[in-house]
Amino acid sequence: MKVFLVDDSEVMRQRLKRLLADVPEVQVIGEAGRAQEATDAIREEKPDVILLDIHLLNGSGIDVLQNLKKAESAPAVIILTDYPYPQYRQKCLTAGADFFFVKSTEFDQVVPALKQLIQRANSSTA
């Protein structure tokens, strides 16, 4: 499963890459910290899953999410953010996010969510 990382923090992107290195079915194919850079790269790279933060340089992860979910074959999106507000959770899920996790309390949910998406992809192709 091809994964693209979008977070304004280089440290967080590195942490995610280390975390995902232990998941054999996952390949990180790109990363970005800016909203427009992320949108352009995702359209070009066509990942299966995006790990997306709400706060980005020069834009919002919510805008990126809404843009991407307009596409016919939109990737799965896992929101991973420091903004635990219910209104953000609702807005992201309404816009098409598959999961919404808070970095400080739900970081450990990323790998199980990815495994669930992998299983879902495998069962739809079987």
Image (cartoon, rainbow, N blue to C red):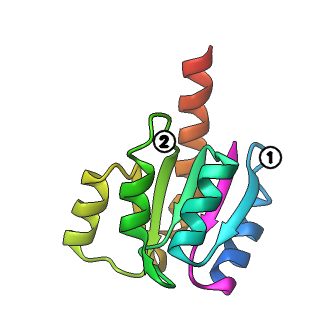
Q: In which quadrant of the rendered view does residue 12 lie?
A: bottom right
Disc 2 to disc 1: CB gap under 8 Å: no
Task: Read off the magenta span.
Answer: 1-11
- Residue at far left of view: 87
> For the C terminus, which image quadrant?
top right
User: Which callout, 2 or 1, points to the residue nearer the camera?
Assistant: 2
Residue 80 position in % (x across, y down): 47, 69
* Relative vertical location of residue 62 with respect to residue 46 in this rendering, above or below: below
Image point 64% across, 47% down: which residue? 47
Q: Secondary structure at mark 2?
A: loop
Q: Is residue 86 magenta?
A: no
Q: Residues within 10 Å of mark 2 (few under 14, many from 20)?
A: some
Image point 52% across, 50% down: which residue? 113
Which of pointers 2 and 1 lies earlier in the amino acid sequence? 1
Depth check: 113 or 45 in front?
A: 45
Residue 18 position in % (x across, y down): 77, 69
In the picture of the structure, the residue carrying the numbered disc 2 is 74
- Kind of residue sitting beneath label 2: Ala
* Relative vertical location of residue 9 with respect to residue 49 in this rendering, above or below: below
- Kind of residue sitting beneath label 1: Pro
In the picture of the structure, the residue carrying the numbered disc 1 is 24
Residue 94 position in % (x across, y down): 24, 52
Q: In which quadrant of the rendered view does residue 6 lie?
A: bottom right
Image point 37% across, 66% down: which residue? 63
